[in-house]
Amino acid sequence: MSNEILSADVKSAYDDFYLGRDEQWRMLGAKYKSINITDVCRGYEFKKVLEVGAGDGSILQQLDVMNAFSEMHALEISQSGVDEINSRKLKNLKSVHLFDGYHIPFADNEFDLVILAHVLEHVEFERMLLREIKRVSKHVVIEVPCDYRYGVDKRMKHFLNYGHINMYTPSSLRFLVQSEGFEVLADKISLIEPEVTKFNTFVNQGKAKSLLNSLRIDVEYFIKKLIISLFGHKRKESFANAYTLLLRKNGDLNIFTH
């Protein structure tokens, strides 16, 4: 694959993305992402693990503290991300590489597991990346934000400002990965946790912090959980903030077979 696959403007947008920006916010997000990753991997043993699109290494740091995997490797498209990952000095991290966004510089079936956490929504050619991940690993964990709602196109500027160019629901993500020959082994639907909502509201958005506002966030979360318990999985998908899948490769894209 050529380095030119990754658009120059996309590459430049991420070059300096991790230079001292939003570290506390990313670490809070990484806390729950790492929990989701280990939850869907429960019952399986993965030793050699690669995170593709590792950002600033915040998820790797959480997994390292948890001692979740004995050998970890990282790929990242931004030099600022690579520098930040290296600065963390993680005990189980064995290598960090800058890559072109699509070509993974490792041999076939080299890894037990690839982690792709909050990356696919940024990828211009998502199927191309999925096929390359399938080449180097038997298993993959994918987590995406569930941005899609009716009328999402009316908020295009908002999502593009976060680099989100693909929109998913749990169902649409399952369709994508299964059509690419992956088998779903485990999944997890996540609601946005009150701790995260409070940080986003009172710190990121700078809204006034009060006991009443904090209580309102807790109550809204409780109501969503109650509705889910009453109306089941379909309702849970509609409230999803993130969706995490553990997959095993099980073939290739196979169309027009009937």
Image: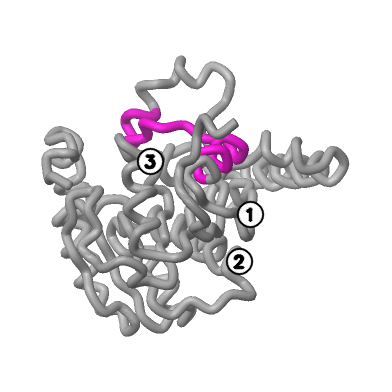
Question: Who's the residue at 31% across and 55% down the image?
Answer: 53
User: Viewer-nearest of labels 1 and 3?
Assistant: 3
Residue 161 inside the magenta-drawn segment: yes
Q: Is residue 122 above or below residue 67?
A: above
Give neighbour class at mark 3: few <14, some 14-19, many 20+ (Cα, 10 Å): some
Q: As drawn, is 247 to the left or to the right of 51? A: right
Q: Amino acid at mark 1?
A: Lys
Q: Is residue 101 above or below residue 84?
A: above
Mark pair 1, 2: CA separation: 8 Å
| Left or right, residue 107 beside residue 219 | left
| 80 in the magenta segment | no
Q: Residue 36: give x, y in percent of width and height.
A: 56, 61
Q: Nearer the viewer, mark 2 or mark 3?
A: 3
Q: Secondary structure at mark 1?
A: strand
Name the disc covering residue 125, or none.
none
Q: To which residue does mark 3 refer?
A: 127
The kind of residue tagged 3 is: Arg
Residue 243 or residue 136, whichever sits in front = 136
Q: What residue range appears in magenta?
A: 159-177
Residue receiving disc 2 = 39
In front of the other: 161 or 136: 136
Q: CA distance from mark 1 to mark 3?
A: 22 Å
The answer to whether mark 1 and mark 2 are in CB contact below 8 A is yes
Determine which of the numbered discs, if any, sits on residue 188 in the image.
1
Q: Which comes sooner in the sequence, label 1 or label 2?
A: 2
Whichever of labels 1 and 3 marks the residue nearer the N terminus, that label is 3
Q: Secondary structure at mark 2?
A: helix
